[in-house]
Amino acid sequence: KNKRLMKGRKGQKKKVVDPFTRKEWYDIKAPATFPNRIAGKTPVNKTQGTKISSDSLKGRVFEVNLADLKGDEDLAFRKIRLCCEEVEGNSCLTNFHGMDLTRDKLCSLIKKKQTLIEAWVDIKTTDGYTMRLFAIGFTTKANKDHLRKTWYAQSSQVRAIRKKMVEVVNREAGKSDMKELVAKFTAGSIGTEIEKACRGIYPLQNCVIRKVKVLKKPKFDITKLMELHSDAAAEAAGAKMARADEGAVPTMAGAGGRL
């Protein structure tokens, strides 16, 4: 019964359609604090009926190398995470979503004969972002005349250093907004401050903010996002960097000190 109805259809293969024929490409636009604004491209399905392509893009997280954003190969060990918050024309307007070190960089820092000290702290920026910062540091020899072959810190010193790390990160990060904090992460200034603060307990080297997670964001505000992506923000970031360079103390070649 009804055997003849299926004849001819059995074994027919479904027509293979390349899925990329129904995709469209959008530019990933980084905030104005980075010199290279276009971080790459991302595909998304074209708008079909009630399924709008821009809705699929919002909330998408991209991992970009800092060397590509800054145009400096020396910063290739940092990975920046950007989250798409708004779609404007053919561009995804992104905001900072996190930071990490590459595995090879982290492995190159870990060696024998030294103590590894880690600390993490939750901070809230002045513009309402809650972030978790992970700091890492390593003990080093006090000076060239250090006779011992190892430079391990005592457990009491490790606890004191960890406490100092939390204090410095709270002080540096708690008084900044998101834009200023990203500039500090990329410059590595927080790690330098930790090294200075802990010098009296035990000398440290390679102090860095290893990882940053954005735990909580304030209510989405399109005007603030547009300010972050405006040309004025880019000029301000450039001027700030220039002022920092001007403030540097000149040194005399071979003199080993200040002028």
Image (spheres, rainbow, N blue to C red):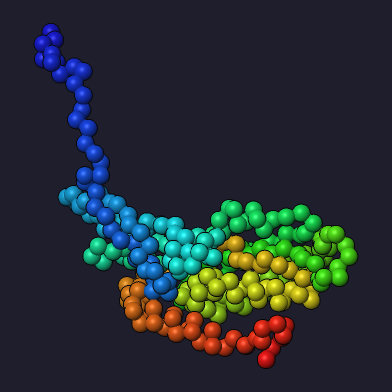
Query: Residue 141's spot in the image, x, y percent?
Result: 80, 67
Answer with left or right where residue 253 lies relative to residue 66.
right
Residue at 32% x, 57% y is 41
Answer with left or right where residue 37 lies relative to residue 206.
left
Q: Quadrant of the N terminus?
A: top left
Q: Quadrant of the C terminus?
A: bottom right
Residue at 68% x, 70% y is 165
Which image quadrant is residue 254 in? bottom right
Answer with left or right where residue 157 lies relative to residue 39.
right
Q: Closer to the camera, 1 or 190?
A: 190
Whether residue 81 can be seen here: no
Query: Residue 121's spot in the image, x, y percent?
Result: 62, 66
Q: Residue furthest front?
A: 254
Q: Residue furthest bottom?
A: 259
Which image quadrant is residue 192 in? bottom right
Residue at 34% x, 79% y is 231
Q: In the rendered picture of this protein, how many numbered marks are placed on residues?
A: 0
Q: Closer to the camera, 141 or 233?
A: 141
From what the image shows, is residue 204 above or below residue 149? below
Whether residue 114 can be seen here: yes
From what the image shows, is residue 168 above or below residue 67? below
Residue at 59% x, 86% y is 248
